[in-house]
Image (cartoon, coloured by chain):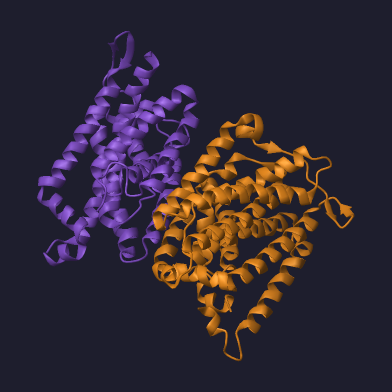
Chain colours: A purple, B orange
Amino acid sequence: MDQILIQTLHGLVNGMVLAMVASGLTLIFGIMDIVNFAHGDLLMLGAFVGASVLGVTGNYWLALLAAAVVIGVLGAALQVTTLRPLIGRDPLTTILATFGVSLVLQKYALWQWGPSVRQISEPVRGDFTLFHLQYPWYRIVTAILAGLIIAALWLFLKYGKFGIWIRATTQDRVMAQAMGIPVPLVYTAVFAIGSAMAAASGVLFGPFAGVTQTMGFDFTLRAFIVVVVGGMGNLGGSILASIFVSLLEAYAAIVVSPAQAVIVSFIVLVLTMLFRPTGLFVPTPK
Amino acid sequence: MTATLAASPRSPARGYWIGFAVVVALLVIAPLVLPPFWQRFVTEILIWGLLAMSSDILIGYTGMVSFGHSAFFGLGMYGAAAALLTIKPPSLWLAILYGLVGAGAIAVFVAYFATRLRDIYFAISTLVFSQIFYVIIFTWTEVTGGENGLTFRQPALSILGWSDRFTPTTFHWFALAVVLVSYLLVRRITRSPFGMVLQSIRENEPRTRAIGYHVERYKIVAVMLSGLFAGLAGVLYAIQNKFAAPDFVFFVVSGEVVIFNVMGGMGTLVGPFAGAAFFLLLREGLSRFLTEYYLIPVGIIFIIMVIFLPQGLLGFLRRRLNA
């Protein structure tokens, strides 16, 4: 019973972080038809940048901001140099290109920061007691913060002028261009926003398990899974799917080892693709 | 489509066969003249090239990018390991049979599910399936040896009652023979009516369906074929190195296979071999002074090739190679 409670909390917290990663990925996919293979590696780089800034300044919130800004700029640069030339080609070539980017980023992190695990210390200390269980406050704060950032993204997309441009481009690229929206700029900005969100989630996730240069692939895979399960390009769906998949994995971890619990989310993905390829959390298309 | 081009009287096929004979002759004498290190290097190129060629059936001819070929390769390795560890005396041919059965079985499984999906979804689902097998192999320590993998003794090279231990030279010739037979088979398949249907799926899937071909069935067979040849490469690699390890089921191998294809030229069958050679040479040359960071320049070269040279190193020969 206690275990179920703890695992529910774990699942919800991990789900919120994952939702943040996935919302960046789904935004990029929805607008540019790009499956960003390097998304997890941007997260990993963000976590490393955050850890370095934290080491110098000692301020966690500054580290969070710095990571988001640095990786956002890097994302924009990547989009301009590697993805812009591929616009109009087969979407599969973008997988190949971002796969190459992922290789380079991963080995760069290894070169810059070495193979050892970096710890990011928690900005909020202390535990709270739920019934008679201890649970760290930091995880709760992380979940809330992730929720706030996603909410901010949603508000920005809904009401911001640039957000409206982004949504217009998603719906009809050619018409958006005809109405005077600078579509190439929108592409770059979206990639930058997605990268910055990945970086921020990397810094948020850092204190849970430390930062290594191989953590990116795991996140890329998970983010793919929830983005497909939630319906490609659908923000709300990805968030629900993140929480759903994370909860399932957390419960599965009670029975089997965490390494094997990953299979549960793989199976959810396969079943979704077979029986409801448009996504679990979207209305049935007519 | 390309078959009609070959109808011209002075067909380019003649030039092709001359080139083919020259390359094969060079590969046959390679182990006799090269120092041991490079001898092994050439053998490895053949094995990785075979794996990459198997993936080319999907990437180059059917237009489906597989990011899960490590699963077939790995199952080939573990299948060979199973045969060599359980059957006394260890038999080369049973190892190949077991490896093919292992790879073929999961290829059927993956094909059944993954071929219902297209483009990016196919790529992701093959990736996810390969990770499922990776997790199973990595955590099922009693059977697969877990993280340490399995080691075994090399079987003897036995053909029709004649039998001898493998030397690096005879293994090279054996691998070369297997690769040649596979290449000629796959070449024949891609030029057959079946192969033409695959290429028409690549060019225009809805139209192929409209003509009346059962596209899903063709795709399933394509994935199975691809998986079988990938498994064969896995068996060769296992026999060469006398072990099977979970690292080879991991995604990195699948990624390298895609890199070989892109670098060498998709849809040429020979291209993947050239891509494997190019990649391994780059790795060899760069890792001497960059150690494991060689992937930084290689990754950048890869990105540049995706953008500026999408047909790969041998892409300009595509027509001739398919002649």
Tell whether A212 sits left or right of B106.
left
The picture places residue B285, in percent across and down from the top left corner, at 58, 56
- Looking at this view, name the residue that lies furthest to the right: B161
Of residue A60 and residue A187, the one placed in the foreground of this image is A187
Q: Is the residue B38 above or below the residue B71 in the image?
A: below
> Which quarter of the picture shows residue B79?
top right
Tell whether A18 sits left or right of B92.
left
Q: Mark yes or no: residue A210 visible.
A: no
Of residue A116 and residue A151, the one placed in the foreground of this image is A151
The picture places residue B156, in percent across and down from the top left corner, at 83, 49
Q: Which residue is at a point 58% across and 47% down the rendered structure image?
A: B106
Q: Is the residue B276 above or below the residue A16 in the image?
A: below
Q: Mark yes or no: residue B59 visible.
A: yes
Q: Which residue is at a point 24% across and 24% down the rendered structure image?
A: A141
Q: Which residue is at a point 57% across and 90% down the rendered structure image?
A: B8
Of residue A231 and residue B95, the one placed in the foreground of this image is A231
Q: Is the residue B275 above or below the residue A17 in the image?
A: below
Q: Quadrant of the N terminus of chain A?
A: top left
Q: Which residue is at a point 52% across and 63% down the rendered structure image?
A: B218
The picture places residue A228, in percent across and down from the top left corner, at 35, 46
The number of numbered discs placed on residues in the rendered structure image is: 0
The picture places residue B219, in percent across and down from the top left corner, at 51, 60
> Which quarter of the picture shows residue B181?
bottom right
